Every structure is written in structure tokens, then in C-alpha cells.
Amino acid sequence: MKKKRVVDVVEELLTPYVKTLEMEIVDVEFVKEGPYRYLRITIDKETPVTLDDCQLVSQYLNSKLDSIDPIEEQYFLEVTSPGVERILKKDKEYEKFVGRKVLLKLFQPYEGQKAITGTLVGLIDDHIVIDSEHMGRVDLPKSKVSVTKLVADFEQEG
């Protein structure tokens, strides 16, 4: 079965269930790392995701996948939270985290930098805009940024 298809099947199976738990699916990956395959589901909710949340989703998904058996090869199932320093993948996450400190990792250097930290202003016309303490306002096309991730700022959050 193709990688894309596995992801689609899992999202279709899981979306209604996680909504009943007032959670959302942040990401679904079916990847090969070394000799192993991983089906990795990232979930989130308003309050912190607990180990019990991950276990509930894992057990539910395991039973559903066992019954329809859409994956022919062996794999490891991982259900996880995005964590404190989560990677922003979906456009709506850029809206949700406006005002938070982020790290942009770039494909090519911008003004000599391949990584820029600043406060997220938002995603505007498919450009990631941040206020950097050292560089001022930075406005980069999303296509030039390899990773955008939150930076834990314990002073701000505490």
C-alpha cells in the first residue's frame, strides 16, 4: 500500500474518534527510518496531552487497523503530542501561535543566517513574518523555510 494511502486511511479512521475526545490530529506520518517503518500520529488539545490520551488513541487505532489491515508491512505505531517546541505544519497553527517565539530554519541563508529566531507576527500571503530582536521584521516566503518551530520561553509562559 502506498504511503499516501496509509496516511489517508488513518486520518479517515481517527478523525471522528479524536473529535469525540475534544482533540485534533496535528500530523500523520508513515515513514521509513533505517530498517523500520513508523506510523506516527501527533495529537493535540487545549489542555496538555497526557500519556493516557496517547494510549486511548493508540488502542483505538490499533483495533481499527487490525480489523481492516490496510498496512501490509510491519511497523511501529507511535502516538505523541507535538511538544513544547512543536513544529508548525498547518497554516492555522501560524494563526494560533501569533505572538509566540519561533525559530525559522531556512533552506538558503537570509542576510547570512540559516536560522532566525523572533516573535511570530503571522502567515501573511504565504509569507512567514516574524519580529527578530537582531534583524527587525523578517518576511520570508514559506517555501524558503524548511522548519518553523516554537521556542520554549519559560519566563513568558510561567
Image (cartoon, grey):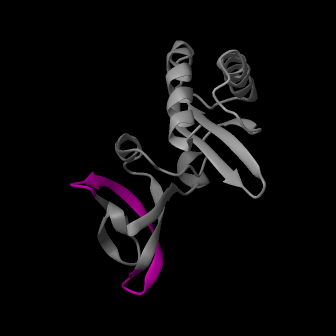
In the rendered image, is residue 83 in sight? no
Question: What's the magenta region?
Answer: 109-126
Q: Is residue 133 magenta?
A: no
Q: Which residue is drawn at 70% across and 34% down?
A: 72
**Coordinates of residue 13 in the picture (x, y in percent):** 55, 20
Q: Nearer the viewer, residue 49 or 126?
A: 126
| Image quarter of residue 60 | top right
Quarter in which the C terminus is drawn: top right
Main secondary structure of the magenta stretch:
strand
Q: Nearer the viewer, residue 26 or 13?
A: 13
Compared with 40, 146 (above or below) is: below
Compared with 14, 79 (above or below) is: below
| Image quarter of residue 152 | bottom right
**Coordinates of residue 27 in the picture (x, y in percent):** 53, 39
**Coordinates of residue 19 in the picture (x, y in percent):** 50, 17
In the rendered image, is residue 3 in sight? yes
| Image quarter of residue 59 | top right
